[in-house]
Image (cartoon, rainbow, N blue to C red):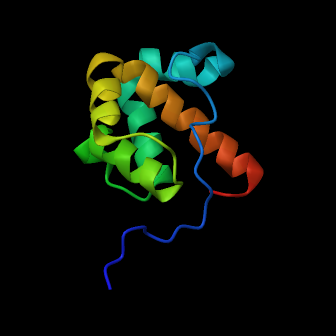
Amino acid sequence: MAVTIQPTRYAPSDFQSGLCDCCDDCGICCCGWWCHLCLGCSIASDMDECCLCGVNMAMRSVYRTKYNIMGSLCNDWLATVFCGFCSLCQLKRDINKRKEQGIF
């Protein structure tokens, strides 16, 4: 018997804020703009990853898969390559919202 659907703890959802909703949290926006590496290391720390590898498509995909966020590897690649700053801020905003909700 082949497994076609992986079990998950979370219902399918979208990110809790849009890719271009940087003004939803001006602190994250400023941190990402002025110290991109600091924000990347903060996200890596939140995800128990090594910040030396950088925040890239792989980390976004791992996060999206863990929380059953809809999307694809292609969308992750497009977001990180063409909207890297916005992608990074979106990921941090989503982490913070999930922490507030107690599901991170």
User: 48 left or right of 75?
Assistant: right
Where residue 95 sits, quadrant-wise, is: top right
| Vertical side of 50 occupied by 60: above or below | above
Q: Quadrant of the C terminus?
A: bottom right
Count of residue discs: 0
The residue under the point 54% across, 18% down is 29
Q: Nearer the viewer, residue 92 or 61?
A: 61
User: 39 left or right of 79?
Assistant: right
The residue under the point 35% across, 25% down is 79
| Vertical side of 57 occupied by 17: above or below | above
Q: Nearer the viewer, residue 30 or 65?
A: 65
- Residue 83 image offset from top left, x and y in percent: 36, 18
User: 69 left or right of 60?
Assistant: right
The extreme bottom residue here reads 1
Q: Nearer the viewer, residue 3 or 44?
A: 3
The residue under the point 44% across, 15% down is 33
- Residue 59 image offset from top left, x and y in percent: 34, 46
Q: Nearer the viewer, residue 33 or 16?
A: 16
| Vertical side of 65 occupied by 53: above or below | above
The residue under the point 53% across, 67% down is 8
The extreme front residue here reads 1
- Residue 21 image offset from top left, x and y in percent: 59, 17
Where residue 1 sits, quadrant-wise, is: bottom left
- Residue 94 image offset from top left, x and y in percent: 59, 39
